Amino acid sequence: MKNYAGRLSLAVLLIFGLCLNFSAAAWSATWKMALGDSNGSPQHEVGKKFKEALEAKTNGKYKVTLFLNGQLGSEQDTVNDAAMGTLDMSCLAINNVTPFSPTVGVLSLPYVIQSLEEAAMLTQGEVGRELTENTIRDAGVRIVAWTYTGFRVLTNSKKPVSTLDDLQGLIVRVPKNEIMIDTYKSWGINPSPMAWSETFTALQQKVVDGQDNPYLTINAMQFYTVQKYITPIRYLFSIEPLIISEQLYQSLTPEMQEIVLAAGREATSHSQKFLADSEAAIIKDLTENKGMEIVMPADNEKLWIEKATQAVWPKHYKSIGGKEKLEKVLEILGRPQQL
Ligand code: MLT
């Protein structure tokens, strides 16, 4: 009996020891985070904030290494890599998530989101939660933070563009995203779909004349060195989720999962403030010091809006999960009549 009790306590001790060892091993890691953009971009701000918050909350046991400028592959490749578990995290434009999880396209339909406040309301509320669930299901990655980058404005190296007539004949790069391709088609041109990682060189070598991206991205990526004219259209408010591999997330303890989500919430609020605080100064710098010229779209963009919403919305009802998804978004935004 005495022997049996002794053996039992030894076994308990061994199991306890093994558990301790196991949690000590699991309780430290360095994650790789891919970013498509460079130093100083909104993506970088979110990546840095997430890293800082995660490292502080885990007393440095969990670390994050940031790989900027598409060093770990094109933005779309990073979604695949994170889904397979060969990459831990990535921060990328939502238009580059849509091919893997089409319902997030509701946030990229032209002229739906009309301000930073609307972008924040949608992503941080019920719609954001539903899209996060869909992205886990469809793409094997979980959105843990949202980057707000501002409206994507059209730039080109050839001529001032104010009307749709001016746009004709320009070769414009777009991401490999059906909604964006269809938007340009509705404006009468056939755009050139191209990975983000190839865009700067294509502009520099004049393979394409123009592209669209937010002011903050144009500035951080130094597009002002290869682009001259800006047309501040407001068809697409750029949102760039920070994603984590769902395989990795599921391997974490519930406490650690909560820490990841809390670090993500901090990064999201930081991004909202960063955009609000910096966009005006960046526009001033681009136009006053970096040689860019702003040309306003004629007639408050009326024709651009009409053409895009009439052609693109109905075409993409199915991919976003039904017309009712757009109805719900417009309802939340207080503009149900827009449909
Ligand atoms: C794109 O145009 O593909 C994206 O907006 C690039 C980015 O991540 O800034």
Image: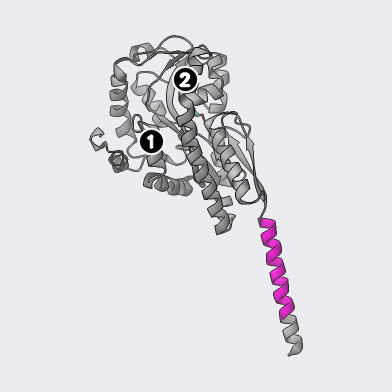
Q: Quadrant of the C terminus?
A: top left
Task: Report whether 105 appears left or right of 19.
Answer: left
| Residue 17 within the magenta-colored segment of the rendering | yes
- 317 left or right, relative to 18: left
Residue 28 vs residue 140: left or right? Answer: right
Dot 2 or dot 1: first in sequence order is 1
Residue placed furthest toward the top? 159
Question: What SS does tag 2 mark?
Answer: helix
Q: Is residue 192 above or below residue 18?
A: above
Q: Is 64 situated above or below 4?
A: above
Residue flagged by tag 2: what amino acid is it?
Ile
Picture coordinates of residue 21 (x, y %)? 71, 62
Residue 154 is covered by the magenta coloring: no
In x, y percent, where is residue 92?
A: 52, 35
At horizontal 45% and vertical 37% (from top left) the residue drawn is: 98
Which portion, as a residue range, is magenta?
A: 9-26
Q: Which residue is mark 1?
A: 117
> Circle 2 sits on which residue?
283
> What label sits on residue 301 in the rendered view?
none
Q: 231 or 59, which lies in front?
A: 59
Name which residue lies at 72% across and 76% down.
11
Tag 1: amino acid: Glu
Image height of 134 relative to 106, above or below: below
Instruction: Assess disc 2: are there few (<14), some (14-19) or many (≥20) residues with their C-alpha within 10 Å of its C-alpha.
Output: some
Magenta stretch: helix, strand or loop mostly? helix
